[in-house]
Amino acid sequence: MHNDSSSRIVAGLHEWISQAPPGAKLPSTRALMAQYEASPVTVQKALRALAAQGMVESRPGVGTFVRPGRLARISDYGWQTGALGSPQTPIPQVSTALRTAPNDAIALHSGYPDRDLLPERLVRAAFTRAARSDATVSRPPAAGLPELQAWFATELGAAAPLGTAPPTPGDAIVLPGSQSGLNAAFRAVVGAGRPLLMESPTYWGAILAAAQAGVQIVPVPSGVGGPNPDELTRAFERTGARALYAQPNFANPTGAQWPPDLADQVLETVRHYGAFLIEDDWAHDFGIAAEVAPLAARDDGGHVIYLRSLTKSVSPSVRVAGIVARGPARGRILAHVQADSLYVSGLLQAVALDVVTQPAWRTHLRSLRQQLAARRDLLIEALRAQAPAANVEAVPRGGLNLWVRLPEATDLARLMGACEAAGVLVAPGDEWFPAEPTGPFLRLNYSGPNPGAFSEGAKVIGEALGRGNTT
């Protein structure tokens, strides 16, 4: 809860309840108002919060009482072992990047930007306007609000070179977040049991989506310079794969941005083999020293399926993304999207559209670029000064993360434990490899909260490395 008057009352009553017997009657509303100098509305809000937590129960006309505790018993779920059987496809655990950090921790592990980097004023105003619109009570079309479809298509089409037909609004599908887009695309254009080429390392969520879709991941070596084009060609030849998943701009976790000649080469390879490139443009709004040039803008033959998320840059509460696909592939993807979610909340679509079409959105992105650059440089300087054994392989020109290589003998699990014990959360690089990791890495997020603590966080990492956390 937020630190307001009702939360003070809840905290105080928590302590009172812990010392009271089951069935004890709480002080009256009038007594609580006097004790906490709060209004009746505030007191009732606190009592409702305690009731929702199962700690008290209200009896109309009588009062509020401490709820009796229930006896804990050991449950036997052994029967489910036989009913469920062995999982056909092992599903990876949810990434460390989604862990909620304690308030006093130095959080270098997160996959999301700090609240200070979000366009909070725009988002709040957009929710207010959307709440007064028909979006609160109407069902949107399955493929999304036409205006938002048009925005996704127009943004991508603006980067199309002369002679290349831009996408149309009808090519776009609005999604409840990019993860659902990955699931739908992998099922629609790859299919269970069939090979999908994937950069290694790559986004852990794509690895998870591939496991859920039951596709066979074929790793292609990739690093701060992008994938090895010869290895990519050999992988297509060897496996007969018909799809490649990749992040050409500010890849998560390496931060790589493909140079133009590599982008041309990959696109030509995909066309040669009659395959699809599933392009994940997750960091479109997080450029620092470079602009984003989507490969999808240069392809009008339907080879590139383009995924564009707004969740990280607008707000984690606005889970909206778009996928642009042409030809029959678009219809198949839409069918899978509908099977999972039927449609995306019209209210969230209206909010997302409102934010990205405001003139202040472009102003926010310019400011964001400067703030990300300052945070990135601050964390790099801190690592160089406090943890010289942690090697930042390349300074990313965009995105949210640093990809840090550690000494070969580093015991990553032990290092993480030592850091966490000192109040620093880091993300292990192993989670970003679809096969065996090629070495010990950390992925550190420079867009997280409290950049003033970066130096202390780097010091903890350096001390943990110096204490011999090795295999």
Image: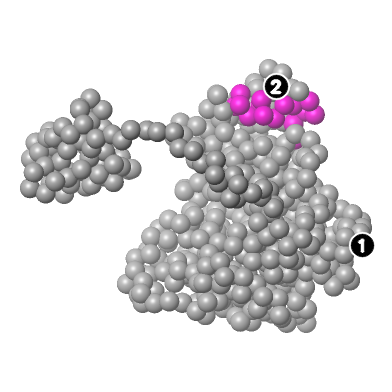
Q: Earlier in the sequence, mark 1 or mark 2?
A: 1
Picture coordinates of residue 319, whole percent (x, y): 51, 61
Disc 2 crowd rating (10 Å Cα; few below 14, some 14-19, many 20+) is: some
Magenta range is 405-419
Q: Give the residue number, with chain letter if any, for mark 2.
A: 469
Residue name at image x 70 percent, y 30 percent = 412
Up-down: is 17 above or below 373?
Answer: above
Disc 1 crowd rating (10 Å Cα; few below 14, some 14-19, many 20+) is: few
In this picture the colour scheme is one colour
Q: Contact, CB < 8 Å: mark 1 with mark 2?
A: no
Mark 1, secondary structure of its residue: helix
Q: Is residue 344 magenta?
A: no
Residue name at image x 66 percent, y 25 percent = 414
Q: Quadrant of residue 388?
A: top right
In the image: residue 379, left or right of residue 20: right
Q: In which quarter of the image is the C terminus?
A: top right
Judging depth in this view, the residue of 301 and 163 nearest the camera is 301
Q: Give the residue number, with chain letter if any, for mark 1.
A: 237
Q: Quadrant of the N terminus?
A: top left
**Alpha carbons under labels 1 and 2: distance apart:** 42 Å
Residue type at numbered disc 1: Glu
Picture coordinates of residue 158, whole percent (x, y): 66, 74
Residue type at numbered disc 2: Asn
Q: Report whether residue 288 is seen.
A: no
Residue name at image x 23 percent, y 37 percent = 67
Residue name at image x 66 percent, y 40 percent = 443
In the image: residue 54, left or right of residue 458: left
